[in-house]
Amino acid sequence: MAINLRKPAEIEKMRAANKIVAATLEHLRNFVKPGMSLLEINQEGEDFISSYNNARPAFKGLYGFPAGVCTSLNEVVIHGIPNKTKVKEGDILGLDIGVELDGYFGDAAITMGVGQISKEDEELISCSYDTLMYAINIVKTGMRFKELSYKIENFVLSRGYVPLHGFCGHGIGKKPHEEPEIPNYLEGSNPKAGPKIKNGMVFCLEPMICQKSSNAVILDDKWSVVSEDGFRTSHYEHCVAIVNNRAEILSVCDS
């Protein structure tokens, strides 16, 4: 497994791409209202990204994906394709966005409520966000990625949910997906095996939370992923760089 170590200048280029990702997600969080179609939401996101010089929506055309924003509604946890479906009060919507800027990539995701949502859905969304922040806070150099996956899994289980299997966080840099793969659960039996986290690594952590079943089902559109249990799901993601032995979030807006 070859995990790239990025120089400070490269991390700054990735920070710039990720700032656009974060700004776009914040813009869409405020933009989305009941009655809007997923196509409208996607178009707004694509246009917002393209308003930055040299920035482009990185997901559009990636592996054949048809849009710049993954719009994952209610039961869809990741890779939702924008269509004519209109969001309504009480829905929950996952928005996952990638940006390429000057040859480097950024990537992050949120799950948001549309209008007023139920307490159960608030707790579901909180689990993905809290898991993400927990993972970021415990990352340190010398920790093995498998140990991080193991700790993420235990945190999710402690909240009464389960992590989606078969999909994972990932390295990022001059490509949108690089080594390593970072599942939200331990693969195998030994969390002390595999590569260690080092300064200069840049990767995306993205807890994908299901309610009862970890088993993934891909819908007929060949992209949208749901849990086998059919219940609502949630997803949060940040891009982080390992700087001074800790994880620094790159996918944040300017304060």
Image (spheres, rainbow, N blue to C red):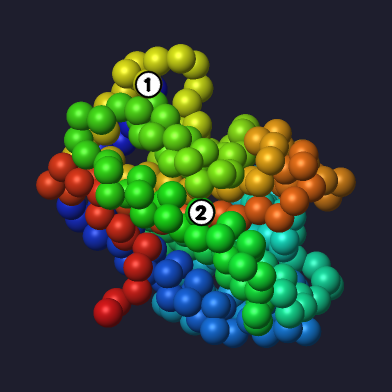
Q: Nearer the viewer, residue 169 or 19?
A: 169
Q: Quadrant of the N terminus?
A: top left
Which residue is at 47% across, 77% downward? 26
Residue 96's x, y, as percent?
57, 60
| Residue located at (46% from left, 15% from top) | 189
Is the residue marked by circle 1 packed among few (<14), some (14-19), or many (20+) residues within 10 Å? some
Residue type, label 2:
Ser
Residue at the spot of label 2: 128
Q: Residue at x 72, y 74 (%)?
A: 90
* The quadrant where residue 116 appears: bottom right
**Measured from the top left, where is residue 31 in percent x and y?**
59, 84
Q: Position of residue 231 (x, y in %)?
A: 75, 51
Outermost residue to the left:
244
In the displayed structure, 215 sits above or below 225; it is above
The 10 Å Cα crowd at callout 2, few under 14, some 14 to 19, many 20 or more, is many
- Quadrant where the C terminus sits is bottom left
Residue lying at 59% horizontally and 75% vertically, measured from the top left: 45
Residue 127 appears in view: yes
Q: Which residue is mark 1?
A: 191
On residue 161, the disc is none
Q: Tell me the distance, in whole angstroms, between the alpha carbons under discs 2 and 1.
A: 22 Å
Secondary structure of the residue carrying numbered label 1: loop
